[in-house]
Image (cartoon, rainbow, N blue to C red):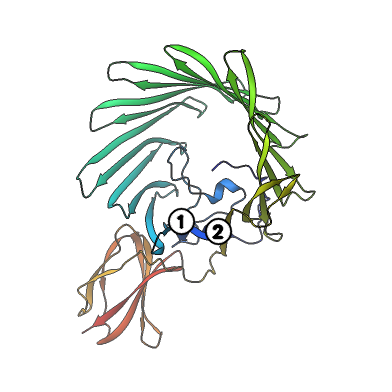
Amino acid sequence: MMAYSQSAQKTTAVKKRIIASSAYSNTVLVDSYIHYYSSTVRGSVHTNERSYFDLFLNSDIEPQSIFCDSTVNYQLVPGRGMAWFMNKSYKYSTKPMTDGFVIKDIGSTKSTRSITYNSYNKPTLINFADTDAIAGATNVYNRVLFYNSNGKLIQDSDYHILYATPHTKKLYSYDAKGNDTLCNIYIFDGTSWEHTSIINKTFDSRNRLISTLKLYSINGVFSNTRLDSFMYRGIDSIFNRHSVYDWISDSSKWKKGEQETMLFNSSKLTDTLIYQYGPALDTLHRKITYYDTTDKLIKAIKYFKHLGANTYASLPFRENYFYFQTYGQTSVSNINPDIIIKISPNPSKGTMHINTGNSLFNSIIITDIQGRIVYSKSAPATNGTILHTQLPAGNYVLSLYNQDVRIASQKLVIE
């Protein structure tokens, strides 16, 4: 989803991170994301609409903006209601940067992705593998990115490992101010590279994007097919009008087919997008973004159908809501139900092995059934450790912590 809303100001008084989002269609809940965290240092104060939608590196070269440990997606299933649909677990480097993730969904497909960064924290290699557990098919490809001496991306290409062939590549050029003014796109047809499209961008003196021209190759001849035009008000960094033109070859003219107009209130805490479409630019709907007046974070986005005569429906046909929590060193427990502690043996005589898969922790605390701490130990940030205790026989609770936040607990029996 594109970011059309005016950015809110960051707050420094309180740290908040998104923990859930939900989407409604005609007042019916159809989609929901739940984000789980295990560290106080993860999660950022989100300041624009783009931050609220998971990027997951599907098309963007930057890591997803929600730095959580896992995201569970629920969707409306006919006859079943809201059901688990997909779980995405993230892996982080010591920077911390997203260096990979694992996707599991109801289609028995397991997708993994690993990311390699250069010394400037730019991703240079993204490896993607998608395995269908039923059919046994595997789709694996590498995405390779190259940068110039100024850290600007100059080539983005795919390589299909299974067939040992290149797939696509994009070549970028920049002006003296560092704006990406040209992108040439190629597809490998099995023997050679085919030049399929060109994207030209134009910027104003403030380095704001004012036009994007897309040209597609038709039988080896590049034809004007779409022109995106952006207009700004004063020194605003967010566009106030976005117009889309289609090239009419018969008359050799551009014809406007879409238009989006942004309206802001005086405090810029609420904005409205008016969407128009068609030859007569008929108004289809408007989108209103609602902010929390204290934290200045987006709390809801609602879409209303246009009824004619500059009137709109009273009930939205689409709604998005976002939910946050305060976090920091004094945060309460953020236990992730997807993190499972494996203690072996359990029951134990005092020596045991602890494993949590890919989840990291840096301290271990054992409490008795009255909740009193009977054992504590600092541990390296690892997913496995050997623990030696001299506790009397009985029932206990073993909890793992990461940066002073409890991430998981498991019953422990000492014989």
Q: Which residue extends farthest right?
A: 266
Q: CA distance from mark 1 to mark 2?
A: 9 Å
Q: Which residue is mark 2?
A: 17
Q: Residue at x 64, y 16 (%)?
A: 253
| Residue type highlighted by circle 1 | Cys
Q: Which residue extends farthest front?
A: 308
Location of the C terminus (image quadrant): bottom left
Quarter assignment of residue 394: bottom left
Q: Which residue is mark 1?
A: 68
Q: Residue at x 31, y 47 (%)?
A: 111
Provide residue 87's location: percent of width, then percent of height: 37, 56
- Within-10-Å neighbours for mark 1: few <14, some 14–19, many 20+: many
Q: Is residue 372 above or below residue 317?
A: below
Provide residue 277's location: percent of width, then percent of height: 63, 35
Q: Is residue 104 above or below residue 172?
A: below
Q: Nearer the viewer, residue 110 or 205?
A: 110
Q: Inspect this view and state whether residue 20 appears.
A: no
